Amino acid sequence: MSNIAEKIAYLVSQKGGRAFYVGGFVRDKILGIENKDMDIEVHGVKPEVLREILSEVGEPISYGSSFGVYSLKGYDIDIAMPRKEHATGKGHRDFEVFVDPFIGTAEAARRRDFTMNAVMEDVLTGELVDPFGGKQDLEKGIIRHIDSDTFVEDPLRVLRGAQFASRFGFNIADDTSDLFRSMDLSALSRERVEDELKKALLKGKEPSVFFEVLRSADGLDVWFPEVKALIGIEQDPKFHPEGDVWTHTMEVLDRAARYRYKTKNPYAFMLLALTHDFGKAVTTEVVNGRIHAYDHETEGLPAIETFLRRITNESEVISYVLNMVPLHMKPNVVAASKSAVKVTNRMFDRAAAPEDLIYFAMSDKPVMSGDNPFTGDPEFLFERYELYGEIMSRPYVTGNDLIEKGLEPGEYFSDVLAYAHKLRLAGTEKESALKQTLAYARKRR
């Protein structure tokens, strides 16, 4: 990839211009993080000249002449010209964009959000151009805005700052935090919000930081009110000495991040970690001096679905979370009581992602406190999951088997198949299960 960048930069230099690596590519290079998304900004040549240069090295694809942004077919690289942006409204598309290849590096960098994203690197010489001290802020671990007047024009920057903090473990500068609190997030599109949320959940070292930053910026109300509702909801200190449901949820999120890439659907898994206790906001009560949240795993489903449909249209993700939340406490309960095989088999069979359920149990593990019996036992659960897989691989009674024995499909047929499935989960050998199922069918007719 660097070869094509250098070729472009060389041809640009022959026309009197300069090409720079910009944005996250430079930031991550300074941090020692691999980033395959290469962005180049070309200064000092007119748009028509840049297009001629790109045509010499490949097939340019334009994202719109007014934006001066191109890519090259077959390459994961974006080539842009310096531009100015001016907000014309609150929406993410409400910007006037002016391409100006002769604006200069400092003014070009000024339109970026944070100093750490404004460092530029000359493609040919490696020289860093850093007009706002971004390299120093990177070294200190500080996320700092560039221009107070233009920063507030795009409220997405609040979420970007939060996800950068969660990914890199950086602190938000005090004056930047003050700006966050002044910005209205209501005009943002779902797609932009979800994009930043995904980065925090899937890339964050501590995804909880994303929400802690939003909490301190008064930025939870519009997009994350169900998460905000967890603040101050008390829990039984015997099982949750860590504090309220918010604190517990944040700890679960960070533990879940250790396992996310072992799961079937990492994004859905992290949303499960975020939403699993939403029901406690509506079920928590004090009974005989003890704090309880009876049935929170099911009572929270309406709030969870409302939240999920607000931030995503991924039906698979929504189905996964709504399936897994009602099951989220079962693994630790069955492990504590060393339940029978048929019990653990039924649990795994109900789960959209049975192995993920174990990883969630490890993330949601209760704290060892007093006589708390639910301390988790991953080894037991993984052994039972392996046994479940072995049992489910055995021959079993099918609908065709029943039809071959003379049963005719009808209203009762699904009930008979469900009975056969229970026998399968119990580990009953197929021949015996078929006899039992046929006997059950005769009683049902």
Image (tube, grey):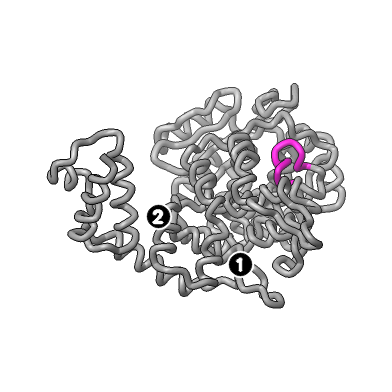
At 56% from the left and 51% from the top, the residue drawn is 325
Q: Residue 385: x percent and y percent?
A: 40, 65
- Could you say which disc has been placed on residue 8 in the image? none
Relative to 139, is 84 above or below? Answer: above
Q: Amino acid at mark 1?
A: Lys
Q: Nearer the viewer, mark 1 or mark 2?
A: 2
Query: Which quadrant of the figure has residue 103?
Result: top right
Q: Is residue 108 visible?
A: no
- Residue, far bottom: 370
Residue range corresponding to the magenta coloring = 219-228
At 53% from the left and 60% from the top, the residue drawn is 330
CA–CA distance between discs 1 and 2? 22 Å
Dominant secondary structure of the residues highlighted in magenta in the image: loop
Residue 224 belongs to the span the image colors magenta: yes
Residue receiving disc 2: 349
In what element is the residue under mark 2? helix
- Left or right of 238 in this view: 25: left
- Could you say which disc has been placed on residue 365 in the image? 1
Task: Work out whether mark 1 precedes mark 2 in sequence or the reverse, and give the earlier one.
Answer: 2
Q: Residue 211: x percent and y percent?
A: 72, 50
- Left or right of 150 in this view: 431: left
Q: Amino acid at mark 2?
A: Asp
